[in-house]
Amino acid sequence: MKDYRELLGTARVMIDDILGIKEGEKVLILSDTGVEDTNGLPELRKALFTELADRGINPGIFYFQEQSRSDGRIPELGELACMNADVMIPITKWAFLRSLSFGPIMFPKNGKAPRTCFVPTGFTTAQGDYVYRTLPKSSEEYYELVDLENRLIAKFINGVHEVHVLSDKGTDMTFTVGKMKGPSSLGLIRKADKPGMGAMLPLGGIVMGIDEGSAEGTLVIDSANALRNGFLEDSIVYEVKNGSAVSITGGKEAENFIAASNNYEGTPEQKYMMAEFGIGCNKNCLLNGRAGEGENVYGSAHVGIGSNAPFGGSVSIPDWHVDSIMSTATVYVDGELILDNGEYVI
């Protein structure tokens, strides 16, 4: 059994480096019954409470019944407590960003929102030591990851850029980015040290929208996708033209992908749209057959296939966006090599 004291370093990163909590501020830890069956979230909650108390800061904890994954809302009393806090730290089983309470708390009519640090949730239950393994234990570890993310993001901003992705499994695809939303961090690239700012503990990667119609070539997914837990039994090969896959082959896994897509409305062009591109930065994340962690693995790359509406695109198919992982990749941006077979060279 892990001990909460192993997460005191993480608590200090949250308090000092992310939130900048000061004596006299009202701090609220928001938590639910769902975290009790996770490995690490109750311990992180205790580590935060302990570290804050040792500094003379007495945090409140609002504890409530687990909400549903996609449409739950915390009790009204909890919403009021959050709105009156200077700092809020949600530690809930399902991502608080999905909650119906997110909008009223983070975008209140009076304009006063708490500084907030979210923690990775939802997929931690089945991932053993995920919380202990992937979260930063020191300021040095935290800022090393933030620095890499910032240097990568700098390569993708200010205009349209041509991206060329290759892998030793056969990926050879080009596309442009810049017309769609992005790039943004899957982790944290800024401190949540001003009212109303929100941040997430580093998962460790960046994502951006692929410009509609720009993707061309071959995409080979060899590790995992969001349709299942566990490694793919065989690779899925997508032949891509004008932004969408026109052919999907590779055996059982390809058949499963096509069968799953048939459960959703939309044309093949829409359902097979190359929607999102991302690369991972976190050396503590593992390829373990789960897309949620795999897309953050240092040197990996992923492509989201399907709906691109979250990135400002025209394809909106609710719940059909399949993040798909390449175990290692080589990436060029405007002809400049930034990732060489899983190793960053910037």
Image: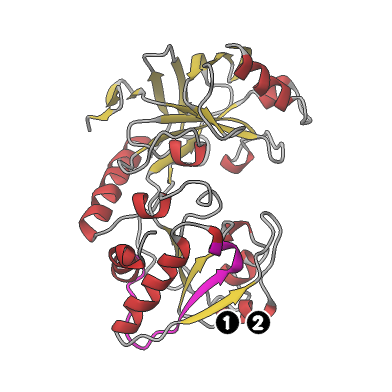
What's drawn in magenta, residue-wise?
17-36
SS at circle 2? helix
* Residue 35: % across, % down: 54, 62
Under mark 2, the amino acid is Leu
Say if the magenta span includes residue 212.
no
Under mark 1, the amino acid is Ala
Q: Residue 251: in sight, yes or no?
A: yes
| Residue pictured at 41% horizontal, 13% vertical | 169
* Residue 86: % across, % down: 45, 79
Residue in front for this viewpoint, 134 or 332: 134
Would you name the residue on which mark 2 appears?
77
Say if the magenta span includes residue 31.
yes
The image shows residue 151, relative to residue 173, as above or below, that is: below
Please indicate whether residue 188 sits to the left or right of residue 148 in the image: right
Would you name the residue on which mark 1 appears?
81
SS at circle 1? helix
